[in-house]
Image (tube, grey):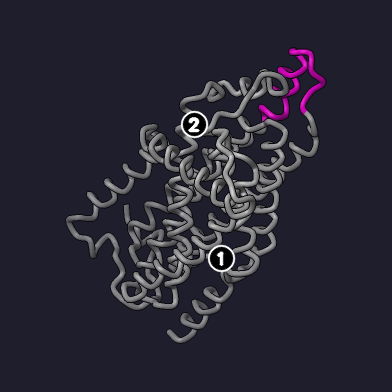
């Protein structure tokens, strides 16, 4: 395996960490990183998610109690999480995403070959860390419930006997808060990229899906939708972080695992298991129990299919990044027009 044929020379300052510069540590580094990433994506430990979920629940109750105390002078001790918790959690997401990004950027600014990439690194690192923790929580929930891989259980008693567990409630509110806060950050804080409106559409559709499934009691299928999304986002953003650090060989491994995980979770499990369940199993199970079928069937499936179209589009962009690396020996996000212009100018000066 020669990483230079995939993620070859970079044009940033500093010494790039390639297969050759790692020397005798090259193969061990590849093996360790590869094993850890495969372990995370396909053999996720339940115990980590269990510990994280207990903390998520505590944070959610703290946010809810704080809002109630400020607004009404007292707290509601009914042991339940309420939708109003979304307000302080969304505000916290905006503060954390913005603040943590700048803190991380300040810490790594001198380490990066190109100091101008510090904020990009901070943004990717914070986002990837959230997705990783979110996937651990999601996998814990899925592993302790009975609707994966038997997705028909998502619909049994959906309008009669199903209830949300405290884990599902807290996880749903956390994810909804993240995407609501993410819309604010995307529109008012983040640097606009070429796919600004595509990303905005993705955030809006995701919020609509999470909110709709929460209100309609479709939380089980909603958890599976989120499971298919968080895992590949971890690889996407950490691959960018490693690229900004000029850890070329490690970025290569992560990018390959991104393509694999994206193909498995978003191009296979999401359309052929999750969407298929919403399209067919929902109608079959609900009507077999005497119901009229899935409420808002067309709208629900329309949102899901819109997400899948976006997945295919982004997978195409990632393949184009790989092709650009193979043909030009340069790795940059094809959505970032400024970075691409910079590369073009650098090639002309050679």
Counting from the top left corner in percent of width and height, residue 234 is at 46, 50
Q: Nearer the viewer, residue 255 or 5?
A: 255
The residue shown at (55%, 29%) is 165
Is residue 64 in view? yes
Q: Which mark is residue 144?
A: none
Q: CA distance from mark 2 to mark 1?
A: 36 Å
Mark 1 surroundings within 10 Å by alpha-carbon count, few (fewer than 14), some (14 through 19), many (20 or more) = some
Q: Is residue 317 left or right of residue 16?
A: right
Q: Which residue is mark 1?
A: 334
Residue 279 quadrant: top right
Task: Name the image quarter holding the C terminus.
Answer: bottom left
Furthest toward the left, the residue is 24
Counting from the top left corner in percent of width and height, residue 304 is at 69, 40
Q: SS at mark 2?
A: helix
Q: Is residue 139 above or below residue 144?
A: below
Residue mark closest to the camera, 2 vs 1: 2
The residue shown at (56%, 23%) is 147
Q: Is residue 18 above or below residue 29?
A: below
Kindly check if marks 2 and 1 are in contact, taking CB atoms under 8 A apart as contact.
no
Is residue 283 magenta-colored?
Answer: yes
Q: Which of the marked residues, 2 or 1, is nearer the chain's N terminus?
A: 2
The residue shown at (33%, 58%) is 249
Q: SS at mark 1?
A: loop
Q: Which residue is mark 2?
A: 141
What are the residue bounds of the magenta stretch? 276-294
Furthest toward the right, the residue is 292
The residue shown at (80%, 35%) is 298
């Amino acid at each position: 395996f020669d990483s230079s044929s995939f993620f070859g020379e970079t044009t940033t300052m500093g010494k790039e960490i390639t297969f050759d510069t790692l020397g005798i540590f090259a193969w061990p580094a590849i093996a360790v990183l590869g094993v850890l990433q495969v372990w995370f994506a396909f053999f996720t430990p339940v115990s980590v998610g269990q510990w994280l979920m207990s903390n998520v629940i505590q944070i959610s109750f703290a946010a809810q109690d704080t809002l109630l105390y400020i607004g009404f002078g007292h707290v509601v001790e009914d042991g339940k999480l309420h939708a109003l918790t979304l307000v302080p959690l969304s505000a916290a997401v905006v503060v954390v995403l913005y603040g943590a990004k700048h803190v991380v950027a300040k810490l790594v600014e001198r380490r990066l070959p190109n100091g101008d990439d510090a904020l990009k690194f901070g943004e990717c690192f914070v986002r990837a860390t959230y997705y990783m923790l979110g996937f651990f929580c999601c996998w814990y929930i899925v592993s302790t419930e009975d609707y994966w891989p038997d997705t028909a259980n998502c619909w049994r008693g959906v309008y009669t006997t199903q209830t949300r567990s405290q884990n599902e409630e807290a996880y749903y509110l956390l994810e909804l808060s993240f995407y609501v806060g993410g819309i604010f950050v995307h529109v008012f804080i983040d640097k606009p990229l070429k796919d600004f409106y595509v990303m905005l559409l993705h955030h809006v559709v995701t919020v609509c899906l999470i909110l709709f499934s929460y209100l309609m009691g479709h939380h089980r299928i909603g958890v599976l939708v989120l499971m298919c999304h968080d895992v590949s986002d971890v690889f996407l953003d950490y691959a960018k972080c490693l690229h900004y650090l000029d850890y070329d060989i490690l970025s290569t491994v992560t990018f390959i695992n991104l393509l694999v995980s994206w193909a498995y979770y978003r191009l296979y499990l999401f359309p052929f298991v999750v969407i298929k369940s919403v399209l067919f199993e929902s109608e079959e199970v609900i009507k077999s129990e005497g119901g009229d079928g899935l409420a808002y069937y067309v709208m629900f499936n329309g949102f899901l299919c819109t997400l899948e179209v976006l997945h295919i589009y982004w997978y195409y962009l990632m393949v184009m990044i790989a092709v650009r690396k193979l043909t030009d020996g340069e790795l940059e996000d094809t959505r970032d027009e400024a970075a691409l212009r910079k590369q073009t100018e650098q090639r002309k000066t050679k």
